[in-house]
Image (cartoon, grey):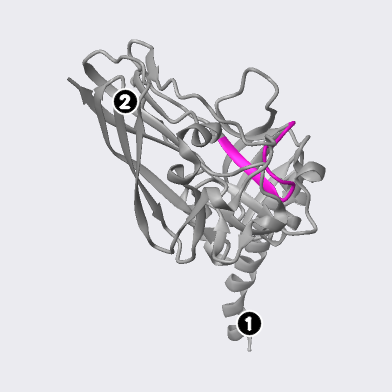
Amino acid sequence: MKTIATNYIPIFFLLVLFFAAGCDKEDDLNEDEIEIKKNLTDGFCMTSNGEVVLTHNDFEYYDYSAHLIYLKDNKSFVEVFENLGEFTVLANEEEIYSGETWPLYLSSSPHGPIIGTHPSFYSDNIVPIGLMPYLDSLGNFLPDPREDERIVDALKKYNQFHAGLSCEITSVDYVSSTNVTVKLLLKNNDDFNYYYIDPEKTGIGLFHYFTNGLFIRDFSAYEMYGSKTEVVSADPWDSWNLDWLSVINGNESKEITITYSNFEAVPPGQYKATFEFPGLGFQVSRAEINQDNGLIWLGSLRIQKDITIE
């Protein structure tokens, strides 16, 4: 019997050391960290000021193309996020990046992830995690901290990941300042339908109410050229019409062509063409997002392409 008992002594001490190590690790946490750890889930979460302010239980889905969080009916952007300050995003209890809420009435903004407030330009059920992009001296976008596979994995774990729309500039044909054509390829990366703003239905003037459209930029010389399109406002300004929208089916791609007849003169050279493809934003209420034939896409996509003008 003594021999058997002796054989168990090393195991006993190993267990003591294991639990002691766990206690030491827990003791290293401050009160805020202990409280956060208790309330985190293994999905997408957000913390601020020593508290968990969002877990995967609080929202329906996350549009990854636009980085919009669609809250459940019992949650409110104004109540929870409008005066949040600094925040941290976690996935599977691992810190991914930090950012801060920022009043949009201010003329400046910090670089990096922000949640725009006062106003947010979206309905009260949407948390928009925007980005003041990091650009290098040549105008190239630096890595976006919101684009992280650990976030994707956490969202997919609870079926909350929407890939959304993507868009690319396929060509820019600059014949003259009165004849500039940009071709875009819009793609639906989900298997269900979206409604998007269709420039053929709105006309170029109303389309430019939602976007500044095409710019041709020389970042090294700080030169920028754009269209002189006369913008047509929605009437009233915060209204929208389903007739302005078209449906892009699940996993479908569509080519969109926009022609400008009044563009600034651009000298020959190497440039970056930039475009912001728009979605409806503050105009759409919580109840209006789901339509008979799909969801209204509410994001905004910044895209660019190297071009040569001869």
Q: Front-most of 262 and 128? A: 262
- Residue type at numbered disc 2: Lys
Q: Front-most of 108 and 176? A: 176
Q: Quadrant of residue 232?
A: top right
Q: Name the residue: 75% across, 41% down.
A: 81
Camera-near label (2 vs 1) is 2
Magenta residues, start to end: 118-130
- Residue type at numbered disc 1: Ala
Classed neighbour count for the residue bearing mark 1: other residues with Cα under 10 Å, few (<14), some (14–19), many (≥20): few
Q: Is residue 23 visible?
A: no
Rendered view: 214 above or below 44: above
Rendered view: 272 above or below 11: above
User: What separation in Å lies between label 2 and label 1 (alpha carbons)?
Assistant: 76 Å
Question: Main SS type for the magenta part?
Answer: loop
* 31 displayed left or right of 144: right
Q: Name the residue: 58% across, 37% down.
A: 130
Rendered view: 1 above or below 255: below
Residue 208 on image: x %, y %? 50, 32
The verdict on residue 76 being magenta is no
